[in-house]
Image (cartoon, rainbow, N blue to C red):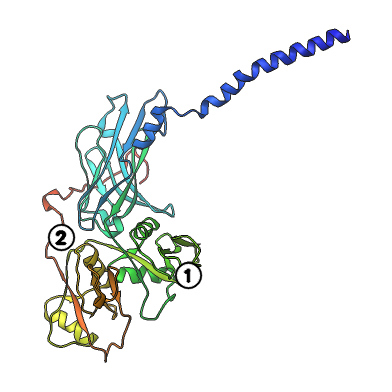
């Protein structure tokens, strides 16, 4: 009996060991990546529902689409419906803007011939209608606030699918602090000062791109997602230790009401031109404002001067007043007598507005909007939800 028992155990062990490779192969097979799935990921194809009742597949652009303020851009989105004989007037297309804080803003919705744009997109958004299965939306006269991530949702009575498109803007990030000094702004005040200087709070992606292009700034500032960061290209002890690597330093998300920092603002292409007003004598701040007004223009904002420097390549080695009562001048081609060896907008601070005398930078606005063809403006109709639609 003992020998038979041992033999039984031995045979059991042999059978168990023989089963191991098959078991391991079965467990490892789901880890293998299907090449088709990888291709779908690059095309940003998302399957939300798949069953025998019908399937909607949405495909959007990989990466991002890029334009500038005032431009016209198409956010691409296509869909395929199975079976293909579905009534096109029961297909609902909805575009939504999604913020980093997962807040949703309605942009555009269409059901058959009915379509409607929402909020600031009214009069600027329309379907491209380039053929069957095209859900792309065209945005005219792009604004700074249009920057961000968009969701394209296509649905019928039973199925829906979603894709995403990132809209990027060509522009420039600049650090900003008010006349009251450094680290004086809570989040809401930072939003306000950027807006007053023809800009918006920069995103992390915009600040990171500016750092890659050489932005080096030792003071922390708010970004649009509520985080506080600053870019360091040349590490030094006064900016977080000399032996630390270059990069974008991140303080994380801070209390928007109680904590105070500077701001990182972002601006884009100008609908106009910044110029240095030629005068025989220098003026104080109030005289500078009036001088631009007499010339039929307004005193330039800080964001407008940065856009003129970055995008229009303005190079002027003369210090002048700008709207926030600071003294600045733009340098594209650095030379020793013009403030150093790096290109940028030089900032001489906030001098006495009454007694200090300088030149002035003015801004002349274009009379026509940028890149907007009035004949392409969308025809908006009233959208009334039916039983085949969901609440907008």
The residue sitting at the front extreme is 336
Residue 78 spot, x, y in % from top left: 28, 36
- How far is mark 2 from mark 1, CA to CA? 37 Å
The quarter of the image holding the N terminus is top right
Q: In this view, does 287 lie to the left or right of 175?
A: left
Q: In this view, does 57 lie above or below 151?
A: above
The mark found on residue 257 in the picture is: 1
Q: In this view, does 133 lie above or below 97?
A: above
Q: Residue at 27% across / 41% down in the picture?
A: 76
Q: Please tell me which residue lies in front, 283 or 54.
A: 283
The residue wearing badge 2 is 369
Q: In this view, does 198 lie to the left or right of 23?
A: left
Residue 198 spot, x, y in % from top left: 27, 68
Q: What element carries label 2?
A: loop
Q: In this view, does 124 lie above or below 56?
A: below
Residue 166 spot, x, y in % from top left: 33, 48
Residue 373 spot, x, y in % from top left: 12, 52
Earlier-in-chain disc, 2 versus 1: 1
Quarter residue 364 falls in: bottom left
Q: Residue at 36% across / 77% down in the picture?
A: 178
Quarter residue 199 falls in: bottom left
Q: Residue at 16% across / 79% down in the picture?
A: 292
Q: In this view, does 266 lie to the left or right of 357?
A: right
């Amino acid at each position: 009996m003992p020998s038979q028992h041992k033999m039984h155990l031995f045979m059991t062990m042999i059978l168990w060991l023989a089963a191991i490779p098959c078991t391991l192969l079965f467990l490892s097979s789901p880890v293998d990546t299907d090449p088709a799935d990888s291709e779908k990921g690059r095309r940003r194809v998302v399957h939300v529902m798949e069953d025998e009742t019908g399937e909607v597949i949405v495909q959007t652009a990989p990466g991002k689409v890029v334009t500038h303020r005032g431009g016209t851009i198409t956010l691409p989105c296509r869909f395929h419906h199975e079976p293909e004989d579905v009534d096109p007037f029961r297909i609902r297309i909805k575009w939504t803007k999604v913020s980093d804080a997962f807040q949703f803003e309605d942009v555009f919705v269409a059901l058959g011939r009915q379509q409607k744009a929402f909020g600031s997109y009214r009069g600027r958004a329309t379907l491209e209608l380039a053929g069957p299965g095209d859900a792309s939306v065209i945005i005219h006269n792009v604004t700074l606030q249009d920057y961000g991530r968009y969701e394209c949702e296509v649905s019928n009575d039973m199925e829906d699918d979603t894709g995403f498109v990132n809209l990027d803007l060509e522009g420039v990030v600049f650090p900003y602090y008010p006349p009251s000094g450094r680290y004086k702004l809570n989040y809401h005040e930072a939003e306000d000062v950027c807006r007053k200087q023809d800009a918006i709070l920069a995103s992390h992606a915009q600040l990171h791109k500016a750092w890659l292009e050489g932005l080096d700034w030792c003071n922390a500032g708010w970004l649009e997602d509520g985080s506080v960061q600053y870019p360091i290209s040349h590490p030094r002890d006064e900016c977080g230790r000399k032996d630390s690597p270059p990069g974008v330093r991140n303080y994380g998300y801070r209390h928007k009401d109680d904590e105070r920092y500077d701001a990182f603002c972002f601006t884009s292409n100008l609908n106009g031109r910044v110029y240095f007003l030629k005068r025989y004598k220098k003026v104080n701040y109030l005289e500078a404002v009036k001088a631009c007004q007499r010339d039929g223009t307004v005193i330039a904002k800080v964001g407008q001067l940065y856009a003129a420097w970055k995008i229009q390549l303005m190079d002027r080695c003369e210090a002048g007043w700008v709207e926030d009562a600071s003294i600045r001048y733009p340098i594209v081609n650095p030379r020793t007598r013009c403030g150093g060896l790096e290109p940028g907008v030089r900032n001489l601070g906030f001098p006495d507005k009454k007694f200090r005398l300088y030149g002035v930078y003015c801004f002349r606005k274009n009379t026509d909007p940028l890149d907007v063809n009035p004949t392409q403006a969308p025809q908006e109709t009233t959208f009334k939800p039916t039983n085949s639609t969901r609440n907008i």
